[in-house]
């Protein structure tokens, strides 16, 4: 999984802080635009961008936290990840 860039992390943290403080998506977008922030593609912000950034980061974090470390069990089935090594290379 590709890591977020430093700028993407800064944007998310700023947006999350404002939203947790009770500011709406539209006002956050205006706030970011007034301070010269741009989307990761260099565009101005709209309320939908703000919502999407918060939603996608939350979904990404949930997905990454649900990846098993080395093994897991589902009923009678047990899945275990084993390191693969190339043995007979000629």
Image: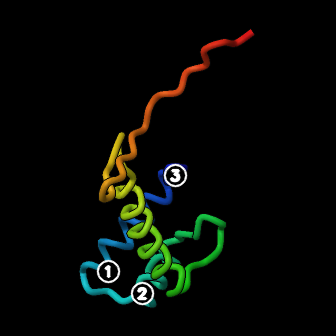
The residues tagged by marks 1 and 2 sit, at their Cα atoms, a distance apart of: 7 Å
Name the residue: 32% across, 77% down. Answer: 18
Which mark identifies residue 19?
1
Residue at horizontal 53 percent and vertical 27 percent from the top? 84
Q: Which of pointers 1 and 3 lies earlier in the amino acid sequence?
A: 3
Residue 43's spot in the image, x, y percent?
65, 74
Mark number for residue 69? none
Q: Earlier in the sequence, mark 1 or mark 2?
A: 1
- Residue 9, relative to residue 42: is it above or below? above
Foreground residue, 57 or 50?
A: 57
Which residue corresponds to mark 2? 25
Left or right side of 37 for 20: left
Q: Where is mark 3, residue-wise?
A: 5
54 up-or-down from 29: above or below? above
The mark tally for this picture is: 3
The x and y percentages for residue 83 are 47, 28
Reading the chain from its start, which is encountered first: label 2 or label 3?
3
Mark 1 and mark 3: Cα distance apart in space: 21 Å
Return the residue nearer the eye: 49 or 84.
84
Element carrying mark 1: helix
Circles 1 and 2: CB distance less than 8 Å? yes
**How far is the residue under mark 2 from the one under mark 3?**
22 Å
Give the class, few, some or many, for how many residues have Cα within 10 Å of label 1's Cα (few <14, many ≥20): some
Which part of the image, by quadrant, shows the C terminus?
Answer: top right
In the rendered structure, the answer to whether residue 14 lies left or right of residue 36 reads: left
- In depth, the one of 30 and 78 nearer the eye is 78
């Amino acid at each position: 999984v590709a890591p977020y860039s430093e700028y993407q992390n800064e944007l998310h943290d700023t947006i999350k802080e404002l939203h947790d403080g009770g500011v709406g998506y539209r006002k956050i977008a205006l706030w970011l635009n007034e301070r010269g922030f741009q989307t990761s593609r260099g565009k101005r912000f709209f309320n939908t961008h703000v919502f999407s950034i918060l939603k996608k980061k939350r979904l990404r974090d949930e997905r990454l936290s649900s990846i098993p470390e080395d093994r897991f069990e589902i009923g009678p089935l047990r899945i275990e990840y084993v390191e693969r090594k190339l043995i007979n290379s000629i």
